[in-house]
Image (cartoon, grey):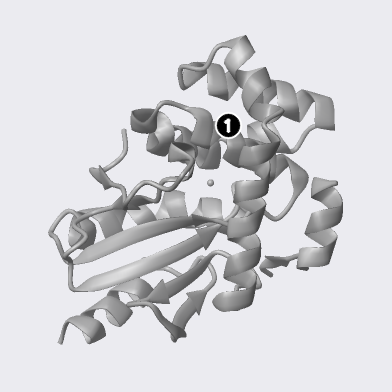
Amino acid sequence: MNRIVSAIMFAALALCTAPKAFAADAPADPRMAEHALGNPKAPVRIDEYYSLDCPHCAAFVVETLPQLTSDFIDKGKVYLVLHDFPLHEMALRATMLARCAPPERFFPMVDTLFHVQRGWLLQTEGASMDALKQQAKFAGLTDSQIDSCLNDRGLEDAILAERLDAEKSVQIEATPTFIFNQNNSDRIVSAAPFDTFKDKINSLLK
């Protein structure tokens, strides 16, 4: 079952080698730049809403994304755009650190966090944070940069605002959610097997 949390519950808490990536026009805070895989002119666009503590999101990255990349993204048929939708406090902290990493390390860090999700997440809160900080160091952040990032209220607010906007404007309630060609009614809500994505994409390519 997909993990679901309301905006109100999440607000209380706040008081998953990468393929070629592209970024949209930079926002006021460059760390909030859009991250995407593939050619922005691809005929099929998929917007993925994910949380780094979501096991279904990790399953998609580990089991489905590699084939989706080789069969569609690398061939210029699909443009995959990522959107932060952290479900819980630890996912929020992980998202902040990924966005504070050097831009070229964003996708490798996110990929690693999903692949080793159980290792950094399913521990005591303190141990989870220590493991998360270690991954941030592997991504090139220093101890002082990590502390500064985790205490950056502006970045935290920007991520939470993005999440709340997705909940209101796109009706995102669970992760992962995949929207096709920016049609809110055309979506997959789960870590569906590759064949499900393949059939959907091929139907849009006709």
Locate residue 31 relative to residue 182 in the image: left or right.
Answer: right
Q: Is residue 85 above or below residue 44?
A: above
Residue behind mark 1: 97
Give the residue displayed 63% in from the left and 71% down from the top: 167
Residue 167 or residue 107, whichever sits in front: 167
Q: Furthest-top residue in view?
A: 143
Residue 124 x %, y %? 84, 31
- Quadrant containing the N terminus is bottom right
Residue 153 x %, y %? 70, 37
- Quadrant containing the C terminus is bottom left
Give the residue displayed 51% in from the left and 65% down from the top: 191
Q: Is residue 77 above or below residue 15?
A: below
Regarding residue 123, the answer to whether it shows in the image is yes
Residue 182, quarter of the rendered image: bottom left
Regarding residue 124, the answer to whether it shows in the image is no
Residue 96, quarter of the rendered image: top right
Q: Furthest-front residue in view?
A: 28
Residue 9 or residue 193, whichever sits in front: 9
